[in-house]
């Protein structure tokens, strides 16, 4: 395969191995001699542990150990799986209770890990777990996302984790008091289970006084730093690797108790130990996503210009403070609070509550889909309340093109944007003009049809720093070592394509190496759509450093002045010399001359600012009023991702994100009963979208290059989800608006929609 051209829609090279079953996942590479771990979990949502007897399990056939919290504490292990704590409105630190690796004194949600059995086989470990005796004293269960109820943590009165605010509350209130129009809407954002194709897993081995832990996560440096701290090890004693990963979506960005307990077991037993989650186990113990209710209010003047915006949110933390959870619906929500609209007077108030449910943390978009969903539902409601076109109302309130760079009310500096141009493009591309005809055709067939718009903006998150290392191998191949971690996004293709474009190295000679803390000094992993911007900027900087290193060496070989040597992204050239070596040839020359310093190059960069992808999603739904079935019939997306390296991969990211958004909008919802039992703990009860539930997407990009990175790129990994929720929900609201229905909330399941229609019909 020859060198790729810039921005070519190249198919993913890694798909060859994935589609032929040659992917290498954590459960594939665990040592054959590894023992098996099985987690004994809580069967009740809230209880005091009166006693825990594991002696019979310890003596069962094949069992090597049963790990409990007492063992961890006796070994001096730091048992607290710590999470970020935000600041309350009054300046105090939010409640951050200890989250023990294994239940200590109490259990607080169904599925909480209590003990881990280590045995020769999984069946032996599972059988031994049946022999564990636990005596519970049931406590009252609290599952409502509100203050009050049974106390879950003594340090959190009324179960409130935090009371957070941002903005100018007094100025916002004053604007509402004098506004010509006020619009208000309560908006629920249903809890979902992430359900990555590959469940969580890990293995650990302790050899020669060194720990190796393999995780299927979203990076290696966070788990490494935590393993060092929790297990009291030196930095040089810990290696973390991360092989192929079958989906992460934010859920695998944080660490979980099993990783540390498995590592501890491997150290204690001197044997490799492996663990893989089962599907229902994952549904019980993986961090969930979303789960919040917001009241959104907007103040407008007589000409429908928005003056102020206020959001009050109650969000579910689950039983403990997960790693990034408190920041998701506070700081990250605020990053795009005002979206693309030119409003400076805002107030965001967020209260987080503990419940006897699984923890809630980052899910694709992490706070930004939630914020845009609230804002775009409210903009749709405002247009309907005013009796004006929603597209025109958005244009009237957009940040004008001439205002960039623009500092938002919550402190984000949007570098570039041309929102009106992109919305005009989306109007043509989605054939908005033909909607009336399509709606009439649906009506003739007894169906309700609606169209929904969402104009979103994203703030790229994650570590702004990243590393890249380029190594010329003896066999003529080239390794690029990266600090990010692919979870299925196509990094191997994109990074090789970009390096090939910058250096002329044939892409078939480039190998992307990731996920090994021994091979690259530092990295930020994957999350927040950061990868393409930070990693390729690091690569570009490393390439420049590499070219600069080769120039004086080649000048000497060419017999010319250093200043005359130029590199044209393919070959080195200099006036007065007929030598035109490629980088591969130059590396071979350097190896022959034993200039080993020229065979490895590494650099680390920090971006000064983020990028802000944005765009328009337009959904059309058709509702069968006899059954309540909602079908997304048309879906059009026009995105501004800046300059693209590989358009087909960008489109694939949008397809996946939209599928997850449609899934949440139409089908997915977690249900707990009043006792905290998860009722949607299998795919028999939890509705994941199938291919037949999704439309053929229509996708285009219009580039307004970012000025915050050298390539003008904007991340695209989460944009599909950010735009999909409101587009679909607004389409459903549009379909039922003329019937007089004013409150339509996700998920739009057949029963829920049928009840909505039937209840309204009975009311009138």
Image: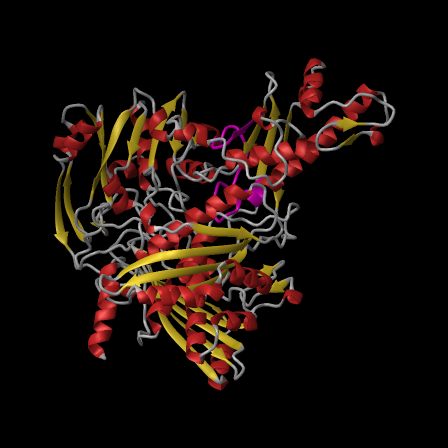
The picture quadrant where one finds residue 736 is: bottom left
* Quadrant showing the C terminus: bottom left
Along the line of sight, which residue is nearer the eye, 65 or 24?
A: 24
Return the x and y of residue 608 as percentages of the image width and height: 63, 51
Return the x and y of residue 11 as percentages of the image width and height: 51, 35
The picture quadrant where one finds residue 559 is: top right
Q: Residue at x 14, y 44 (%)?
A: 51
Along the line of sight, which residue is nearer the eye, 144 or 660?
A: 660
Q: Is residue 546 magenta?
A: no
Q: Residue at x 28, y 67 (%)?
A: 147
Q: How is the image coloured?
A: secondary structure
Q: Residue at x 12, y 34 (%)?
A: 131
Say how many tags the image has: 0
Along the line of sight, which residue is nearer the eye, 724 or 474?
A: 724
The reply, left or right, for residue 562 in relation to residue 736 is right
Q: Judge whether residue 20 can be spotted in this image.
A: yes
**Relative to 114, is 749 above or below?**
below
Q: Residue at x 49, y 85 (%)?
A: 180
Q: Is residue 514 magenta?
A: yes
**Relative to 58, is 559 above or below?**
above
The picture quadrant where one finds residue 645 is: top right
The reply, left or right, for residue 662 in relation to residue 421 is left
Return the x and y of residue 270 as percentages of the image width and height: 32, 22
Magenta stretch mostly in which secondary structure? loop
The reply, left or right, for residue 70 in relation to residue 91 is left
* Quadrant showing the N terminus: top right
Which range is magenta?
Answer: 510-535
């Amino acid at each position: 395969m020859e060198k790729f051209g810039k921005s070519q829609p190249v198919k993913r090279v890694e798909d060859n191995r994935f589609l032929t079953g040659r992917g290498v996942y954590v459960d594939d590479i665990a040592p054959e001699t590894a023992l098996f771990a099985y987690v004994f979990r809580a069967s009740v949502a809230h209880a005091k542990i009166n006693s825990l007897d594991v002696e019979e399990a310890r003596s069962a056939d094949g069992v090597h150990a049963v790990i409990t919290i007492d063992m961890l504490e006796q070994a001096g292990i730091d048992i607290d799986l710590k999470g970020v704590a935000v600041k309350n409105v009054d300046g105090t630190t939010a409640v951050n209770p200890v989250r023990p690796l294994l239940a200590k004194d109490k259990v607080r949600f169904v599925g909480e890990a209590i003990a881990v059995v280590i045995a020769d086989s999984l069946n032996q470990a599972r059988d031994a777990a049946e022999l564990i005796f636990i005596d519970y004293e049931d406590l009252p269960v609290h599952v409502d996302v509100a203050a009050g109820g049974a106390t879950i943590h003594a340090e959190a009165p009324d179960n409130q984790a935090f009371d957070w605010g941002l903005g100018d509350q007094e100025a916002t209130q004053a604007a509402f008091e004098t506004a010509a129009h006020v619009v208000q809407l309560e908006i629920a954002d249903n809890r979902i289970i992430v359900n990555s194709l590959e469940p969580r897993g890990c293995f650990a081995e302790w050899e020669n006084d060194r720990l190796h832990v393999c995780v299927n996560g979203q990076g290696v440096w966070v788990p490494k730093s935590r393993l060092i701290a929790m297990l009291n090890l030196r930095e040089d004693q810990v290696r973390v690797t991360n092989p192929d990963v079958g989906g992460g979506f934010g859920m695998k960005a944080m660490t979980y108790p099993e990783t540390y307990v498995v590592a501890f077991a491997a150290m204690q037993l001197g044997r490799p130990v492996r663990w893989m989650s089962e599907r229902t186990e994952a549904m019980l113990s993986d961090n969930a996503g979303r789960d919040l209710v917001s009241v959104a209010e907007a103040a407008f003047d007589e000409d429908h210009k928005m003056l102020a915006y206020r959001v009050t949110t109650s969000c579910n933390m689950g039983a403990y403070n997960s790693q990034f959870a408190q920041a998701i619906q506070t700081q990250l929500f605020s990053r795009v609070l005002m979206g693309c609209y030119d409003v400076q007077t805002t107030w965001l108030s967020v209260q987080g509550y503990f419940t006897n449910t699984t923890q809630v943390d980052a899910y694709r978009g992490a706070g930004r889909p939630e914020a845009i969903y609230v804002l775009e539902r409210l903009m749709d409601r405002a247009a309907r309340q005013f009796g004006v076109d929603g597209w025109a109302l958005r244009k009237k309130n957009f940040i004008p093109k001439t205002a960039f760079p623009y500092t938002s009310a919550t402190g984000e500096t949007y570098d570039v944007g041309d929102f009106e141009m992109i919305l005009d493009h989306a109007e043509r591309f989605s054939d908005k003009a033909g909607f009336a005809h399509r709606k009439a055709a649906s009506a003739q067939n007894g169906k309700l049809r609606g169209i929904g718009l969402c104009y979103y903006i994203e703030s790229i998150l994650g570590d702004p720093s990243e590393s890249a290392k380029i190594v010329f191998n003896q066999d003529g191949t080239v390794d690029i070592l990266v600090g990010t971690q692919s979870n299925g996004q196509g990094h191997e293709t994109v990074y090789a394509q970009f390096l090939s474009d910058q250096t002329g190295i044939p892409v078939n000679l480039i190998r992307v190496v990731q996920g090994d803390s021994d091979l690259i000094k530092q990295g930020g992993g994957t999350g927040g759509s950061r990868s393409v911007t930070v990693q390729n900027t690091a690569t570009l900087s490393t390439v420049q450093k590499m070219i600069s290193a080769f120039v004086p060496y080649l000048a000497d070989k060419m017999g010319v002045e250093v200043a005359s040597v130029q590199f044209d992204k393919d070959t080195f050239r200099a006036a007065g010399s007929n030598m035109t070596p490629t980088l591969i040839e130059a590396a071979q020359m350097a190896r022959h001359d034993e200039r080993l310093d020229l065979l490895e190059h590494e650099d680390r960069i920090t971006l000064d600012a983020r990028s802000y992808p944005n765009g328009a999603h337009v959904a059309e739904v058709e509702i069968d009023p006899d059954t309540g079935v909602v079908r997304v019939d048309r879906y059009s997306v026009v995105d501004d991702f800046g300059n693209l390296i590989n358009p087909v991969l960008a489109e694939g990211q949008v397809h996946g994100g939209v599928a997850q958004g449609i899934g949440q909008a139409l089908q997915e919802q977690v249900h707990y009963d009043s006792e905290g039992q998860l009722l949607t703990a299998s795919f028999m009860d939890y509705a994941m979208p199938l291919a037949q539930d999704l439309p053929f997407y229509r996708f285009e990009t219009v580039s307004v290059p970012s000025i915050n990175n050298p390539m003008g790129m904007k991340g695209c990994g989460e944009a599909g989800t950010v735009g999909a929720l409101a587009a679909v929900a607004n389409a459903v609201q549009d379909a039922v608006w003329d019937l007089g229905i004013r409150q339509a909330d996700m998920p739009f399941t057949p029963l829920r929609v049928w009840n909505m229609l039937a209840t309204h019909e009975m009311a009138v």
